[in-house]
Amino acid sequence: MKKKVRQYAQQIEVGTLDRRHVLKDFSRMLDNQIEKIVLFLLEQQGLLASRIAKLNEYQEALEQEPDISQITQLREAYRAAGQDLLKLLFFVEINAIGLRKILKKFDKRFRYRFTDYYVKTRANHPYSLLQQVFKHVGLGAVIGAISRNLHELQEHQGSYLSIYDQPALPFQDPVVDSLKAAVDRLSHSTNFLNFLAQHALIMQEELPTPTEECADDQRYHFMSLFLNLVNTFLYMVNTYIIVPTADDYSTMLGAPATVCGVVIGAMAVAQVFSSVYFSAWSNKSYFRPLVFSSVVLLVGNAMYAMALDYRSITLLLVGRLFCGFGSARAVNRRYISDCVPVRIRMQASAGFVSASALGMACGPALAGLLQTNFKIYKFTINQVTLPGWVMAVGWLLYLILLWITFREPSHETEEKNVSQDKAGPGENDVLEKGLKQPLLLSSEGKHEDENGDGECDDSEEAPEESRRPTTSIASAYRLLTPSVKVQLLIYFMLKYAMEILLSESSVITSYYFGWSTSTVAIFLACLGLTVLPVNIIVGSYISNMFEDRQILLASEIMVCIGVLLSFKFVNAYTVPQYVCSGLIMFVSAEVLEGVNLSLLSRVMSSRLSRGTYNGGLLSTEAGTIARVIADATITLAGYLGQNRLLNATLIPSLFISVASIIATCFTYNSLY
């Protein structure tokens, strides 16, 4: 069909075809191809139903004369039927992907909104075959039959309950879980766990092979995953634990309070560089970069804590730079992507995001508790130095635990899989070729668009080239489509607005309201605690009621409103105005971040799913650069005086938020 689209374009150029004929002919072709898919689906569905019916008869006979060995064989037969059903779902899914890509290619080539027309006219028609691809009611019934019979074959001594009597405790089986996950992907339904996991932007191949799943099982180690999540948590605590006291620390060292922007932002400056070399290092090892990260953070926090006794603002900044150079979030994300089995990768990704959110809330809360003042030898222990000492001890304990319990995953398995892929097709390839239908791009023609929109480009590129990771930031950037660039701009905007709100909170609240460190810490901790509840609401309800692009645009507008409400327009600036506007801005930015990253994970090129320069690194760099610029803005605006600091820092936030709204509106139809 890709060749047909190219042929249409050539015929229109020479004038042998008009657009109306092209639209009619292409619609008819799509209808025919979808009909072939649906008929094949119904045929295979019927064969599976007959197979399950025979197994049911055999099961009824076994109930009269139970035999443990035969029951085990019957259970495995049901699971084998489930595996075949899973292959059928993969077949439907990959054809659905092909349908989406060819529609997008047609729109891009002819500058025509054909996708909207085709989906609207076919989706709700009573004879629609398109519905069968996405609704799959019959497949749901087959899944239900397999689940119920597997449940019946479990040993339930003394129990008379069936699967229908326990709706709150659904039957758990690896095959059933895989089927449910495949159905969710096909129908684009979402839940809180899935929505939260997409925040990590840990992308993976659309259809993982059994070989890849086996390799992941061999490399997986629970304690190592747990230590990665602890590293994420500690780093986020380390980032935000100084926010309530950074202005006091600056003034104690003889600098203006607004230098807190540079102190807080120094960590982000170093993270811009550390993200790249940690991502590259994780190609060869996970243990060594985590050890290096822990040592650097331990040293950095000790330097931060000692700066007061040495009366050195330079030592303070160098300590924060060291903390930024120890940012191993790229390693944490990469470990989940490469070493966690597909079946639990979503839970691990959600754990990564939850650990980050919990650390963000615990950091300021912990700072509020560290209100003391004494000396140990010549070192001062008070509210501004104690965060550094506490984090130094925390990283020391983490380093000891890491050294004892972390297990370096084998990289030989990954290299072996790569060599097997290069060696040639195996049995699985033969099976996939037997399932291929016209909408599934052939191995000779399937490749990524050079612009990174996930479509087939006009230039013929080898399939292995299309799967190879990018080798530089520049090549990764060239893979980004205009809509992905807009989403990275949105990510930049929300991180900028959030950093302005958080980093200048201690200066603003002490100047206008006379808040103490403990009060600021409570305010920031309350903001951080809204992250998970907001994501529960959006992931479980709002995202199923509205389209992602609608939530995206509405959230951007709410962030803009929050920024506007934060301005000081009159002489009196009240606590309710500051708290309410800050809450609106922060919560809207959290909703925006979730939906934006969820959308990014679906539209970013699959070539950015692995390697050093992956999609997670690009989003991290965009957010980190936003934080650096925001913190620098606070310090520069401080030269205007604290009475002008608030409005001076909010003006860039307002400008960027308005720009992102305009950019979103211009690319509104290409954000899927």
Image (cartoon, grey):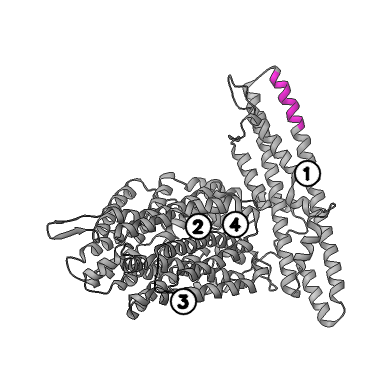
**Which residue lies under the disc numbered 1?**
44
**Residue 266: quarter of image:** bottom left
Amino acid on which the number 3 mark rests in the picture: Pro
Q: What amino acid does circle 2 point to?
A: Ala
Give the secondary structure at mark 1. helix
Closer mark to the observer between disc 3 and disc 1: 3
Q: Which residue, given by chain and number where applicable, does mark 3 sit on? A: 652
Question: From the viewer's perspective, is residue 52 above or below residue 113?
Answer: above
> Disc 2 vs disc 3: Cβ atoms closer than 8 Å?
no
Say which label, 4 or 3, has the lower sequence index. 4
Task: Please tell me which of labels 4 and 2 falls first in the chain.
Answer: 2
Check the image and report above or below for 467 versus 195: below
Gap in angstroms between the C-alphas marked 1 and 2: 37 Å
Whichever of labels 2 and 3 marks the residue nearer the N terminus, that label is 2
Of circles 4 and 2, the one toward us is 2
Residue at 66% across / 31% down in the picture? 164
To which residue does mark 4 refer? 205
Q: CA distance from mark 4 to mark 2?
A: 15 Å
Looking at the image, residue 608 sits to the left or right of residue 325; the answer is: right
From the viewer's side, name the closer residue of 422 and 196. 196
Span highlighted in magenta in the image: 53-63
Q: Is residue 628 visible?
A: yes
Q: Quadrant of the N terminus?
A: bottom right
Element under label 3?
Answer: helix
